[in-house]
Amino acid sequence: MNPVKEKIIRNACQRYANNKSRLIDILWEIQDHLHGIDSEAMTQIAQLTGTFRVEVEGVVSFYAFFSSSPKGKIVIRLCDDIVDRLAGLHHLLAICRTVLGIQPGETTTDGRFTLETTPCIGMCDQAPAALINDTVFPSLTPAKLGGLLSELQQGKSPESLVSNFGDGNNGHAAIKSSVNNNIRLTGPILLSEHLAEAGLKQALNMSPAAVRGLIENSKLRGRGGAGYPIGKKLNTAAKTVASHRYVICNADEGEPGTFKDRVLLTEKADCLIEGLTIAAYAIGAKDGILYLRAEYRYLHQYLNEVLDKRRQHNLLGNDISGSGFSFDLRIQLGAGAYICGEESALISSCEGRRGEPTNRPPFPAETGYMGYPTVVNNVETLCNLPPIVANGDAWFRHFGTQESTGTKLLSISGDCLRPGVYEVEFGIKLQEVLELAGAEDTAAVQVGGASGTMINRDQFNRRISFEDMPTAGAIISFSSQRNILDIADYYLHFFIEESCGYCTPCRVGNVFMKKALDKIRHGQGDPADIRYLKELGKTIIATSRCGLGHTSPNPVLSTISHFPLVYAALVKDHNDGLKAGFSIQEALDEARRIAKRRSLIYDPTYED
Amino acid sequence: MTAPPRTFTFHVDGKVVSANSGQTIMDACDQAGIYIPRLCDVEGLVPQGSCRVCTVKVDGFTVAACTHPAQANQWVEHATAEIEMYRRDLVLMLFHEGNHLCPCCEASGRCELQAMAYRLGISQDQQYPYLQPTRPLDTSHPDIALDNNRCILCGRCIRASRDIDKKNIFEYVGRGINKRIGVNGDSLADTDAEIDDYAMDRGVCPVGCIIRKYEGFFAPYGERQFDKAPIGHDIENQSQPDQLNTEPCKEGDS
């Protein structure tokens, strides 16, 4: 092997003590230097970390940001989200084709540029957006992207092309990004100023059991979507007999249309780590992990600086503030997998494995990271802890509704005048939310991102709360000009890309759903296809192993039930006895190609 | 060893089944002579719950019987019309995901996917589309060939090689619909795979993906594994011999 390459791989493995549970970090370092992890590299990594080459290959091939074939030195990832699609993604693709001469998935022959599309990078409020290496370029236009590409061709680095910094900490020396926070509405809990470290100070003066009791009494529920009571989770982990316990912050915000954690990570990082420290104290954890999605790598250095500063101020590390309690954490960078937002998949990923969910029971709070009790919480959930502990559970319960206490951050995007982050009290009507965001002429709203539901105008008076309409916060508004089926089709495409493939219904069923939806979209569907979609969706939901498959048919099923006329207009009975959608030319295409029997009539691209 | 196992009972379709703590629903049902269909699970390997064919309902929630622990007094639905429909859908998905041309497949007659289809009453293709994968065959090894187009991703070879042979010849690579079984090298000949490995045993690969060279079609029609009795009869037979279905399986398209 090339000695330079060999040394890069050896150094990467050594930096993590040849520990196979740090495989994701090792692979990142090699991917950064060599732009790919080929079979030679995999063999060497396996030797150094004491594992098998095929296991390394399993991990490399699982994550979208790793590749076994070399990528260009500059990787352009255009965000392929529904909001970006509607904002003109295809124009950006056309510019890349013209300037670089490549299609998504291709690398220029000189090995300099790779073009890819990637699911939501968390910038729907400033779409269309792209990641160029780790640098985010929001609010793109074809002209802007064309300009960027020609400067990159002249040899400039992506980070040197950021001219205007965004608001708030986006201009911080460790971030220097043109991303904007777009905070449109601040509320009393998450986006307002609180006395720094008051919650942590208060917690350290209480017993861990009293902290858990206070959080339980606040009735705080998880903000990642499932809404599990946090006090209950903390109690389970604290009461499970074990020598170690862990707390993990889930900053793998991958739900299409969600970007509020990006803003919290940028503006409230201290509050977040304070909350994680409180959670650690409450369950008796000495170690923690912040799992940061690869798309937010531009915040990595900044977050590390925040941790360092807290260590200097004795807010992390040994004997925090003289309390006798010790806690520290590391940042685990993800590598491009939506499924890692599922807590057991996230734990698998932190352990250096394929990000596949595990069977439950046992639950992570009993058997989690490395087999120890682990509490995994969303960024927003953890940011609630300092103000709750500082101000008391009664203060917190005062906001929101009976079952949904506190406030919720909403990420609002799509067809509206003021896309951005809104802190609202639970119980707010969707109609009020749309008015706040300036969403006029809204015909449909996708509540809860890809795994959520598409609702129609009849339901705009529903309330955002665990009682009525639970959501992790993604609200995407679609005007009456938008094609509902294109949107449902996008979400299926997303789930097919992001399914881990572990269980049959999610791996295969979603592909079948998309094929049937395609048939309907192309006017070849008959009424039986709608029944077929409903039945198939039911099987996928009932038999899938984790939340991804339990929700992936939702966008199709909810559009069928809430927009039946859209479907009815496209399907018709075919009484000719032929299978609808069957094309004899298509069926024979491969054979005709092999036999070199092309048709002048049917093959517009006929060449002799 | 910890405390001695606790014995308790629970209900399967109204029948009382007894179980020991630590047993899965499937373990307990197997003991009681109730066969729950399965493909990724097989005696002797750690269950993983990936094919989902063993789906049952426990107190109204669907779970995989092979991984879900049996618990006292739980109410399990197993042979209901709804659950059987799910199982048929799942088996059909596996048929349509790969290339399963039973009449010309070496595994025909001892293939668990084919046998499961017969057991569940599937005899012809349904409305699902065929995905027709075109993955290259791996014929590099002198004694073993791999046809990944027939693989149902049950992962039995992975567990057999890792846990029994201690060789880790196989592992999942890729994700989603592109997930497949990879080998620990550029091809199978690069690995230390041997024909006598447990992973290459006929009982491990349930379909015709792992092919033992030079011994194809070793059993004539009428004498193949599932020619005389349907899949699962051994489990049902042990405690209820009168229920053995002796009607021979029909040969035919998938």
Image (cartoon, coloured by chain):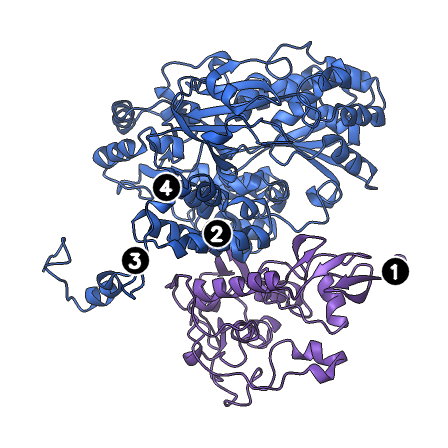
- The CA distance from mark 1 to mark 3 is 58 Å
- Residue A581 image label: 3
Q: Which residue is drawn at 39% across and 61% down?
A: B129
Q: Which residue is drawn at 44% across and 15% down?
A: A166
- Residue A534 image label: 2
Using a 10 Å C-alpha cutoff, classify the residue at mark 4 as few (fewer than 14 neighbours), some (14 to 19) or many (20 or more). Answer: some
The one of A13 and A393 positioned closer to us in this rendering = A393
User: In the image, what residue type sits under mark 3?
Assistant: Gly
**Residue B15 visible at all:** yes
Chain A palette colour: blue
- Residue A566 image label: 4
Across and down, in percent, residue A147 comes to 26, 23
Using a 10 Å C-alpha cutoff, classify the residue at mark 1 as few (fewer than 14 neighbours), some (14 to 19) or many (20 or more). Answer: few
Whether label 3 touches label 2, CB < 8 Å: no
Q: Which chain carries label 3?
A: A
User: In the image, what residue type sits under mark 2?
Assistant: Lys
